Image: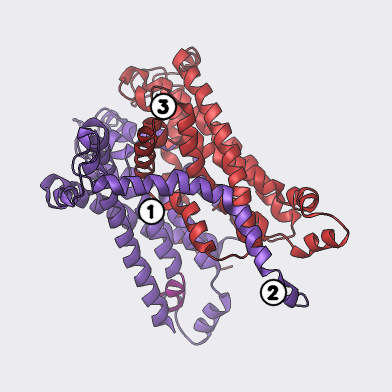
Amino acid sequence: MMKSPGLKIYTIAYLVFLYAPIALLPIFAFNDSRVIAFPLAGFTTNWFVEMWNDQQLWIAFKNSMTIAVSSALFATLFGIFAARASTRYNFPGKPGIIGLIMLPLVLPEMIVSMALLVILIGIGVPLSIFTIILGHVLICTPYAVAILSSAFSSLDRSLEEAAYDLGETRASTFRLIILPLVMPGIISSLLISFTISLDEFIIAYFLGGNQTVLSVYIFGQFRFPQKVPAIMALGFVLVCISILLLTIAEYFRRRGIAKTGGKDTGGFL
Amino acid sequence: MDNGSSRGRFRDSEAAQGYLLISPTAVYAILMLAAPLLAVFVYSLMIDSRAGASAGFTFGNYVEVWSGRIYQAIMLRSLWVSMLVTLITVLLAYPVAYFVSFHVKPERKALWLFLITIPFWTSYLIRVFLWKVILGYNGVINSGLMSLGIIDEPLTVINYSIGSMVATLAHAYAPFAILPIFVSLEKIDRSLLEAGQDLGESKLLTFWRVTLPLSMAGVIAAVLIVFIPTIGDYVTPELIGGGKIPMIANMIEVKMLKQNDKAVGAAIAVSAMLIVTAVSLVFLLLNKRFLKGQK
């Protein structure tokens, strides 16, 4: 390994820049002042209490959970179908079909949500939590496909053939051999889709009708300067949850690689 | 392979199984993505959708969008902001990707990448909001500098400006740029670099003539991955720009929902997709030419 202190210092400075805004969350979430400014005023947990007692926040939280759990389940299910099809089978038009499925990755979310809105209003579907789920499944599926494709492609095909030779059917092979091997990929896909759906704002904002979810609630609070400290507290809690979920996802991803005997080549995506 | 001939025989059934397996996901994407996009395209060619039903076929909406002063200004601004963000993000990200790929021990690389990607997975809205808190009139920078006695009056240049929007977006999309560059650097055969240095090139020249060209595909991928979402960003102009510096996404919202002019809104949306596609194609072609020049 070559040594170069300059690059290392630069990278650490870069990481500090990356994390600096997030570091403000705990500082001001515990700061005893309604104004977000220096110098700090003292320690308090009032903002967490205020957050806890906010009825609207709980409604938004419950809606968000329903949406994130359903989106994660459906996106991962669609992801399993697409990833298995694209890694195991060859068929004409495959690049085009996969391209369409992955398209939301390169489309601005505003365009996805407006397109969906136009057609939903056109056919008279009332806007609700259900329509948010429709949109979130669409944008989570590409991530699920990407994660699951790498899980499926690291499978050794001879394991599957051995199972057929030993008399297992296609379905039982999938259940007994393939599914357990890609399980870490499935869990990681569920967690990533859950996190994306929980964070997503634009689709939730435009397709939700009068239903509030967490991100829309946060956006709405920006209009009230006195609510800012409570948002800092909420943000701190959300960041902690995200980091926890990601750490679990990363753990399963690594275990998956170890299980299939592959070499770790880096993080998500 | 010993089963080569049998695979040929089963080709049809293999294709059939592939279609069957991918059909749920494909049907969902067709219903929820292809059909709605087609609907937007049809809307953009309608005469007056405010009246309810379509009244005919026209290119008038596109003429309005492409020749209107306000539309032009907003589209140029979106392009300018997203290009600036892309340039800054990619330039700042390259050394980081280079460091992780060339100077970190293989077993610690995953940990570094994990550290770099964590901020990306924390709530986007909260991160943008934090920049508002940092850059605002009574924000962290102003109050911090005032309490230190460096300035007497709050700085006004840092709030509600294009510069603060660029800073916010560059921060939000930073991890996006690092990953593709890192992947392309990882693929470089290390013996090529040693060969370069054995033949008497300096480290800097080796980087310039071997490493940089070989990682260009990753740089192009990073450019696209940052450029595409930033040009369509809605939250940052709304919160950091204070709604006074709209970009394409904000304009689509105003037309589609606030003014209920779906035809023009759809024309803007299609135009935005065309701009994104055009810029992407330019970069992909550049990449292709670049790779050809290598040989």
Look at label 1 and name its amino acid: Val
* N-terminal-most mark, 2 or 1: 2
Q: Is residue B112 visible?
A: no
Q: Colour of chain B?
A: purple
Look at label 2 and name its amino acid: Gly
Under circle 1, the secondary element is helix
Q: Is residue B13 left or right of residue B160?
A: right
- Say which of B134 and A239 sits in front: A239
Q: Is residue A264 left or right of residue B257?
A: right
Tag shown at residue A165? none
Q: Chain of mark 3?
A: A
The alpha-carbon separation of the residues under discs 2 and 1 comes to 43 Å
Residue in view at x 42 percent, y 57 percent = B93
The alpha-carbon separation of the residues under discs 3 and 1 comes to 34 Å
Under circle 2, the secondary element is helix
Look at label 3 and name its amino acid: Pro
Residue B97 location in percent, x, y?
48, 60
Residue placed under numbered mark 2 in the picture = B8
The span shown in magenta is B206-215
Residue placed under numbered mark 3 in the picture = A126
Residue placed under numbered mark 1 in the picture = B226
Q: Is residue A42 visible?
A: yes
Q: Residue furthest bottom?
A: B199
Q: Are marks 3 and 1 on the same chain?
A: no
Q: Chain of mark 1?
A: B
Q: Which image quadrant is residue A121 in? A: top left
